[in-house]
Amino acid sequence: MTTKLFFKTLNLEARTTMSYRFDFWISAVIGFIAEFGAVWFLWNAVFKESNSDVIGGYSLSSMYIYYLTVILISKIVRGSRSKNDIASDIYQGNLNKYLLFPVNYILYKYAQHLGVMFPSFIQFFLFGVVVILVIDLPNDINLSFTSIFMALITIFIANILYFLMNYMLKLTAFWIDNVWSLDAFKWFIVSLLGGYMLPISVFPKNLQIVLNYLPFKFLFDFPVNTLFGKIGVEIWVKEIAISLIWCLFFLIVCRLVWKKGRLQYTGVGI
Amino acid sequence: MKKYLRLYAYFLRFSFSKSMEFRFDFFFRILMDFAWYGTQIAFFSILYKHTNLLGGWNFDQVLIFMGSIFVVDAVNMTVFSNNFWWLPTYVNRGELDYYLMRPVSSLFFLSLRDFAANSFMNLFFAIGFLVWTILRYPESFSIDKIMLFIFLLICGILLFAMMGMIFIIPVFWLHSQKGLKDIFSSFQRFGNQPHRIYSGWIKHVLTSILPFAFVASYPVSILFENSPLKAVMHSFILVISLFLFMRYFWKKGLRAYSSASS
């Protein structure tokens, strides 16, 4: 697949996503405020009723910033749902053309994924700038150019990892009739174990050890802590290497499932 | 009324036979809901490792609250969610004509036609979990309180469904993919937490315009309070008001609808 085609696909998908502009921006702004509002009240109550100043290494104000950041980062890591996802291609027989076209299917889908995500990328920067300008950062958050640079790389890898997990799961559409519930299942697991619902440092210690061996923390908790300057460069390099190994693992599994699944495919309309 | 009950029986029969076609989906729906129940229980269990009370409730009380949330969600997933999912598609494609031509209320038909038989099993689990959390509670509850709790929870289920519909109806004007369903899902988080953690104007919003606090939190709180009548009246008035508003809003929406064939 040529670079030109990759960016053309990305561009087309971004423009399609932006076609529902009102719905998109209203949902984004109100959704962001509502989601943050709910956790604001929750953690306010937890800190007040526990009489604690620090929980899981976070003060109340840094806990707020954690959630603001994780909500924003998740927009880029997850992207939005595309109408042209792999499962739809399989169910509707659209896969026929991709089997004939001289394009790498997984790369084509990743270009579409980035395109759908593009408006979320704008939201990330707009809301991110507002957050940085409006809110005084607490002392335990050390935002620097190095941490921002490291975080951007981490978020990019998290995006690839999430895409590959998603891709692997959607390929099961070769065998099963509806992948919607599996998709929701994945999100429930990932949001809890990846640090979206709660920072991992809040989990019981033995569970934290188990989570260290799983790929989920690389999606949300690790990028946020990298941005906050809580990860040293040496540890960061090691963790990035591990996250890349997870990406490779999912890529290999995806290829194997794709090979098997293609044999199951009965192209509608052939 | 008899006509509507007979019609609903046909909906059920059709939905059960349809769900048998997709057996994997039947299994995965159960798996998905169990994952949701599991993450919610884990979430509150972890929070309670750091505090003994949340919104004045201990963990046993929050477990009853979670059971109530699961029941509301299971009823919604079984009875309403499929219908709400497809409604924006019908409106955007101009395919409502078929439903508007029927000699029954279009709102009734489009809200209840598709019963998700594949979510039905989860309803049993959710009810079972709620009963278990009530039975394991260290103190027993009087029959009066249990009856009031059930009444308020039914009101909560209706409020949740009507709010869901109210957020989808704007699709008649917006022609977006899901109406304002994503905004509804974001607000829903307020209802999944005990209402006593909220203060100020948001507390008033959650008990009036967007009564998420009355979906499960208030019903559970009457089990632990001595004067529940005010909450019962409040909930009942909310159900009536929201129903009247939803019907009015639906009629307004239909006026903005343009068919694909006309």
Image (cartoon, coloured by chain):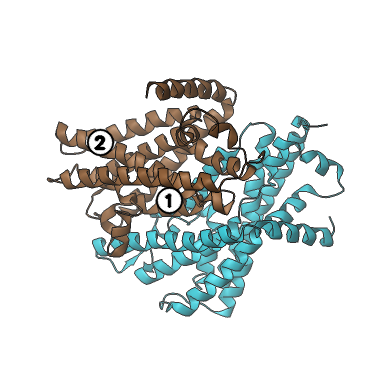
Chain colours: A cyan, B brown
Q: Name the residue under label 2.
A: B151
Secondary structure at badge 2 equals helix
Q: Which amino acid does label 1 sit on?
A: Leu
**Residue at horizontal 77 percent and vertical 52 percent from the top:** A108
**Residue at horizontal 48 percent and vertical 38 percent from the top:** B81
Q: Which amino acid does label 2 sit on?
A: Phe
Q: Which chain carries label 2?
A: B
Residue A214 makes an appearance in the image = no
| Residue A241 image-quadrant placement | bottom right
Q: Do callouts 2 and 1 point to residues on the same chain?
A: no
At which x and y percent is residue A8? 79, 60
Q: Name the residue under label 1.
A: A207
Q: Is residue A190 above or below residue A30?
A: above
Q: In this view, does B155 lie above or below A202?
A: above
Q: Quadrant of the C terminus of chain A?
A: top right
At which x and y percent is residue B219? 25, 43
Tell me if mark 2 has few (under 14), some (14-19) or many (20+) residues whose alpha carbon lies within 10 angstroms of its own: some
At which x and y percent is residue B141? 16, 36
Foreground residue among B210 and B241:
B241
Q: Mark 1 lies on which chain?
A: A
Asked if residue A163 lies left or right of residue B141, the reply is right
Q: Nearer the viewer, mark 2 or mark 1?
A: 2
